[in-house]
Amino acid sequence: AQKVTQAQTEISVVEKEDVTLDCVYETRDTTYYLFWYKQPPSGELVFLIRRNSFDEQNEISGRYSWNFQKSTSSFNFTITASQVVDSAVYFCALSSGTYKYIFGTGTRLKVLA
Amino acid sequence: GAGVSQSPRYKVAKRGQDVALRCDPISGHVSLFWYQQALGQGPEFLTYFQNEAQLDKSGLPSDRFFAERPEGSVSTLKIQRTQQEDSAVYLCASSLLIFGEISGNTIYFGEGSWLTVV
């Protein structure tokens, strides 16, 4: 079975703090892809990153960074020096051998000024 | 257009009413998906089109749900005799490539159609 768990329902931080959003996944496939999407209040899911199962190299994009660890089946997302505009719901998703995405339940991030 | 466009953005339907939700994918995108997102949940797969062919409708909750993409571009999700449990955001997404050629292809979502059944 495939599953994505985002245990943190809601996180509140003060602006400029760093914050890490956790994602744990389950799949029996050896080839799979992991994604992070941001959903602002407007509702659109904004693509942030895709990572395949053979590439465990961590990635940094500006204030965003991702830590992929196959040993713990985790794909965590860190925002450095958070800003109010980062406030949104963040979803982790899994796709393995199929076109279907399996989404987690999301983490609501509130960044307070 | 530049992104996936959906209409209407908001729809309030009386129970038993039929509704139609439209999706205009990114130009040239072959694959099109519909997802349903209940309040406080992640999106769940409904159906997949490759051009005009509906290759997978396994996620449609009941036979009251029907989707089509007759010319391989715009798609419509129709819900007949709406019920309160149909209240959700319906997200359309598209992708340039055909799945099966390159697995794990990135899909791009629209803003969704927020359906409330009263």
Image: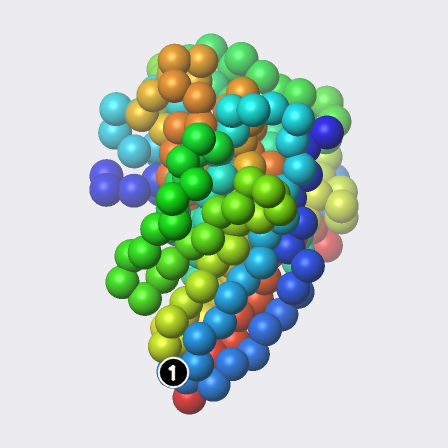
Q: Chain of mark 1?
A: A
Left or right: B59, with A56 as reference point: right
Picture quadrant where residue B23 is located: top left
Viewer-nearest residue: A9 or A23: A23
Left or right: A91, with B30 as reference point: right
Horizontal and vertical percent for residue B66? 61, 24
For mark 1, what is the residue?
Answer: A16
Give the farthest residue toward the bottom: A113
Left or right: B35, with A64 as reference point: right
- How many marks are shown on the rendered structure? 1
Q: Quadrant of the C terminus of chain A?
A: bottom left
Q: Is residue B41 visible?
A: yes
Picture quadrant where residue B7 is located: top left
The residue located at (49%, 39%) in the rendering is A34
At label 1, the amino acid type is Lys
Left or right: B83, with B3 as reference point: right
Looking at the rendered structure, the secondary structure element under dot 1 is loop
The residue located at (60%, 33%) in the rendering is B45
Using the image, determine if residue B23 lies above or below residue B87.
above
Horizontal and vertical percent for residue A79? 41, 67
Label 1: how many Cα within 10 Å (few below 14, some 14–19, many 20+): some
In this picture the colour scheme is rainbow
The residue located at (72%, 54%) in the rendering is B118
Using the image, determine if residue B2 lies above or below residue A98.
below
Q: Is residue B17 visible?
A: no
Q: Quadrant of the N terminus of chain A?
A: top right
Using the image, determine if residue B43 lies above or below residue B45.
below
Horizontal and vertical percent for residue A83? 37, 77
The residue located at (23%, 42%) in the rendering is B2
